[in-house]
Image: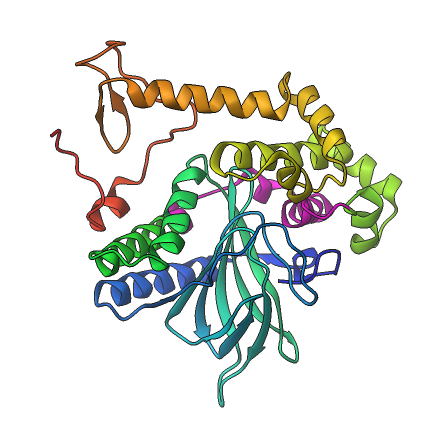
Amino acid sequence: MAEKGEPTGIFAAKRLSAHNRAEMRDIFDRAIELAERDKLRLKVPHEVKHALKHRGMHYHYRPELFLQLQGRTDFQFPRESFSLSPDELCVIPAGVPHGELVYPEAARPFRNLVAGFYNNTLSLHFAYEARPHHPDIEVIEFFDAPNLDVFLTLANSLAQTFQSQGPARDSVLKGLSIALIGLFRNIVETGTGQLNSDIGKVFHAKCIVREQFANPDLGVQNIAEHLGCSADYLSHLFHTETKERLTHYIQRIRIEGAILALETTSLNISEIAYAAGFADPAYFARIFKQHKGLPPQEYRAQIEAHRVEVELQPKTVFFDRLDFTHGQPKVAIVPDKMAPLDAVALSRAGIVSGNKR
């Protein structure tokens, strides 16, 4: 939402209250109802080459979703622009630069609900007009999401399907929208996060790292300045409360982001390095090897080899497991990265069925 390196409301944003959670649940319920009645309008910008900087714009490492509640958001992209009005959903694909200007209605202030994706974590926040035409974070929550790849798959599929011209395009968009919104609705109902158990400056430091890990200038000194304390004090406090040094936490979050990109995107190693906040791809490769024991290229090759091996085995695919009963091996295997999906949300969208075919 803000330019890289600029202060944002996340430094002072409050966590969701019980009232905020209830409001989010109601908003998602209404969005699902609108989607079921074909009344939720979807807008998606065209994808562009990743990791290109444009003046007055920023981009994110993963998709970002905006559900307009009140007022209007004017989005500017490298190749186009459009406005988002109430009851409209915008999916911005990963790596697409964009700028935002917001406008209130005649009698109601601007407001929207934004979803972001991090490393095994997703965030949901309400945005407001912090200063004329510029949005910022009002309240935010980070939720543990071991099945983050499911959210990302649905979001990416929405963006890709929107740009397609298939005969069942509208039906697919409807199903994907309901499934994704349903997953958001359920995580608001039941989700928790370790990040949310931290207090004070440690919580805000973690928020900053997860929000801005792609910023190569992000460091302990930078974070401490935003939080109004010394770097030594923040480092000591962070280590005391988490048993982990803040410098290591920053590096770990960047590597976790790179791992997810290696597993789920076609970005090359240099693009992943830059997007993860490393100014030097060679340094990124050395740090990655320290964390994972092998270079990023070999890590990606191993993941792909495992994926191909699993794909070639005879199996029945259920919503929560792979069944190899009629092939080899003869025991059911659930890949490490495959967490149980939310059957209610997905089946409601008509995407999965519990019946074996």
Question: Which residue is located at x 68 percent, y 42 percent?
Answer: 274
Question: Which residue is located at x 44 percent, y 72 percent?
Answer: 69
**Where, quadrant-wise, is the C terminus in this rendering?**
top left
The one of 246 and 87 positioned closer to us in this rendering: 87
**Residue 226 to residue 297: above or below:** below
Q: Position of residue 337 (x, y in %)?
A: 43, 28
In the image, taking residue 230 as reference, residue 323 lies left or right, namely left
In the image, taking residue 340 as reference, residue 92 lies left or right, namely right
The one of 156 and 252 positioned closer to us in this rendering: 156
Q: What is the basis of the colouring in this image? A: rainbow
Residue 338 seen by the camera: yes
Q: Position of residue 87 (x, y in %)?
A: 37, 72
Name, please, the residue furthest toward the bottom: 106
Residue 189 seen by the camera: no
Q: Position of residue 275 (x, y in %)?
A: 64, 44
**Where, quadrant-wise, is the N terminus in this rendering?**
bottom right
Residue 91 position by quadrant: bottom left
**Magenta span: helix, strand or loop, mainly?**
helix
Question: Which residue is located at x 78 percent, y 53 percent?
Answer: 227
Q: Position of residue 143 (x, y in %)?
A: 50, 44
Q: Which residues are magenta?
A: 187-216
**Residue 102 to residue 92: above or below:** below
In the image, taking residue 179 as reference, residue 294 lies left or right, namely right
Q: Is residue 146 magenta-colored?
A: no
Residue 151 position by quadrant: top left
Q: Is residue 195 magenta-colored?
A: yes
- Total tally of numbered discs in the picture: 0
Question: Which residue is located at x 33 percent, y 32 percent?
Answer: 340
